[in-house]
Amino acid sequence: MPVLSVQSLGKRYGAVEAVRAISFQVQANEIVGLLGPNGAGKTTTINMILGVLEPTSGSIHIEGIDLRAQRVRALERTNFAAVYAPLPGNLTVYHNLRIFGLIYGVKDLRHRIEELLVHFELEKFRRTKCGVLSSGEQTRVALAKAMLNRPKLLLLDEPTASLDPAMASDIRKHIRAFADGRAGGVLWTSHNMYEVEEVCDRVLFLSQGRILLEGDPKTLPAKHGQKSLEDLFIAVARDTHVDGGA
């Protein structure tokens, strides 16, 4: 059973179709990159999977559970991190993790927080307010929060944006370890084609709200006459003719 199954998903704002009947899956132990230029529909898609936006059409199933019919059961298997959604800056690292752990109903919460503080090398920041942490430290806290409930589906929207190369590399290793070590899957948006090629097992290219291309990030560019994933991204972003056949 896929961790995530999206079927004919669409979102319309009046006459504007932000997402146009897209279908895809994320399997267990798989990291799928959701790529495309600004305005392609990536964040809208993520927000529909999170239950923040109501789809105009189509369906979303998380581990076979219909998000629309059983919202709580579906979302308790999910978590999320993004640089534009920082944790409350006036709360300490520990208090943020505790509050979100209570929201998610995490069992043996104190032990789980201690595990994550160690795993993400945050022990010395436990009493530090998140608002004074560096961007890299805040990203590590956000990922610790995203792992609290041991999600089956992890949604990441630009998780390494603004991080220095060393910190971004550490974050990628954490996320790859999550996918490899658990029966979970990851849906990841990024504009960094190097990290996408390094981390993702499969990519989906969105253009004007529809899936234009899909495949292995290491082999997909050559299939469409491009030298690199970045060249392919630029071709899609500039609306250069790209054959949609996989």
Image (spheres, rainbow, N blue to C red):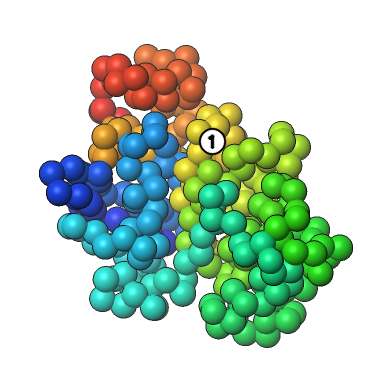
Question: Which residue in the structure is indicated by mark 1?
Answer: 196
Location of the N terminus by quadrant is: bottom left
Residue 181 visible here: no
| Left or right of residue 245, residue 118 in this image | right
How far across and how far down the image is residue 166, in percent? Answer: 75, 37
Badge 1, how many Cα within 10 Å: few under 14, some, many 20+? many
Measured as percent of width and height from the top left, residue 214 is found at 35, 36
Height in image: 103 above or below 239? below
Residue 240 place in picture, x, y as percent: 30, 17
Residue 61 position by quadrant: bottom left
Residue 3, x across and y down, in percent: 42, 62
Q: Residue furthest front?
A: 90
Residue closest to the far left: 15
Q: Residue at x 54, y 79 (%)?
A: 103
Which residue is farthest right? 124
Q: Quadrant of residue 116?
A: bottom right
- Residue at 30 percent of width and 33 percent of height: 207
Q: Residue at x 80, y 64 (%)?
A: 128
Q: Is residue 32 above or below residue 208?
A: below
Question: Which of these two is toward me, 67 or 216?
Answer: 67
Point 39% across, 48% down: residue: 43
Q: Quadrant of the C terminus?
A: top left
- From the viewer's perspective, is residue 4 above or below residue 168? below
| SS assignment at label 1 | helix
Q: What amino acid type is highlighted by mark number 1?
A: Val
